[in-house]
Image (tube, rainbow, N blue to C red):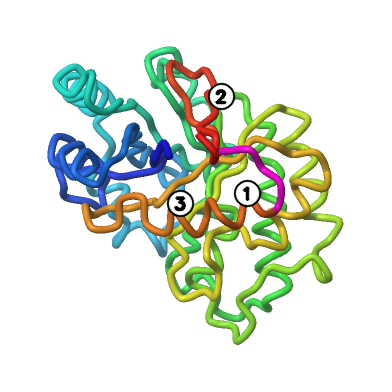
């Protein structure tokens, strides 16, 4: 089986400290044939509300666009023929960040670009203060609204990342985002992904949730029922120990639903790693 991981972070991310070369060496040792370094470029935090600014690592350690891309390409050349090291980036969506990405990223220079939602209307959803005095329904409706909006963003991307990311930090007893509660919102999101021919990520960094991956198996099944066929695997790891974490169980679930394999990207072109190969 061809094993790959299309969502990982290196020392170029503000919340990771493993150099790209060390990540590549560890991935090779684990038998991967492909790894994408999709470091955080969170321009959505540039206009974050004042209460979050002082503790924002995104503002303290801004993304080195050219440095990361150059270093990853060097590592890719060094490991050519042994493992494909893909140059990638994970961009945090907000409406006011669109022009920043258009102005500062050369989308043609990358193998893969992930579009993720980490902020909601200027608030950091990984900060527990975000949830103060907000109901679970309001939080999730706002989050799903931004996920839907992000699909139509002006900048070029390939993958919609970790739908359900907000569940990692929700303080509510019920952490599941379920179809019975948000059927119309979820169907709208999934249909938009399919219509725009984007890829739905299965993200195995599921901190503090009952999921195997984000989004849930229920949502993945619904995506398939609606005609979605592009899915990617991402561990979202920031350390060598979690590279390709839960790959086998994620592939097993996806295969049982009916998917033929995972999608990965080379020079922004989708490839399929079939489960039976």
Is residue 42 among the parts visible in the rendering? no
The x, y position of residue 249, in whole percent, is: 50, 59
The x, y position of residue 128, in whole percent, is: 45, 74
The residue that disc 2 covers is 155
Provide the secondary structure element on which disc 1 rests.
helix
Residue 219 figure quarter: bottom right
Query: Residue at point 14% right, 40% down?
Result: 19
The x, y position of residue 104, in whole percent, is: 39, 21
The residue that disc 1 covers is 255
Q: Nearer the viewer, mark 2 or mark 1?
A: 1
Query: Residue at point 52% right, 74% down?
Result: 209
Is 104 located above or below residue 188 in the figure? above
Residue in the foreground of this view, choosing between 265 and 138: 265
Residue in the foreground of this view, choosing between 32 and 46: 32
The residue that disc 3 covers is 48
* Position of residue 247 in the picture relative to residue 18 (left or right): right
């Amino acid at each position: 089986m061809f094993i790959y991981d299309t969502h990982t972070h290196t020392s170029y991310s503000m919340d990771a400290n493993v150099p790209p070369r060390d990540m590549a060496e560890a991935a090779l040792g684990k038998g991967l044939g492909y790894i994408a370094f999709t470091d955080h470029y969170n321009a959505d935090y540039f206009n974050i509300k004042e209460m979050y600014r002082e503790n924002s690592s995104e503002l303290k350690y801004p993304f080195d666009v050219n440095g990361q891309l150059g270093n990853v390409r060097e590592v890719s050349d060094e490991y050519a023929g042994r493992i494909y090291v893909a140059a990638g980036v994970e961009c945090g969506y907000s409406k006011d960040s669109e022009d920043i990405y258009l102005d500062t990223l050369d989308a043609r220079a990358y193998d893969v670009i992930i579009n993720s939602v980490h902020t909601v209307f200027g608030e950091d959803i990984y900060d527990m203060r975000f949830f103060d005095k907000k109901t679970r329904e309001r939080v999730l409706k706002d989050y799903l609204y931004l996920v839907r909006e992000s699909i139509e963003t002006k900048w070029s991307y390939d993958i919609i990342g970790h739908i359900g990311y907000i569940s990692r930090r929700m303080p509510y007893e019920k952490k599941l985002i379920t179809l019975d509660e948000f059927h119309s919102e979820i169907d709208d999101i999934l249909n938009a992904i399919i219509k725009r021919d984007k890829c739905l990520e299965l993200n195995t960094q599921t901190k503090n949730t009952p999921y195997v991956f984000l989004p849930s198996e229920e949502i993945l099944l619904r995506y398939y029922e609606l005609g979605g066929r592009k899915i990617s695997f991402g561990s979202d790891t920031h350390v060598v120990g979690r590279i390709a974490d839960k790959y086998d169980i994620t592939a097993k679930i996806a295969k049982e639903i009916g998917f033929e394999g995972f999608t990965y990207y080379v020079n922004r072109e989708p490839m399929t790693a079939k489960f039976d190969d």
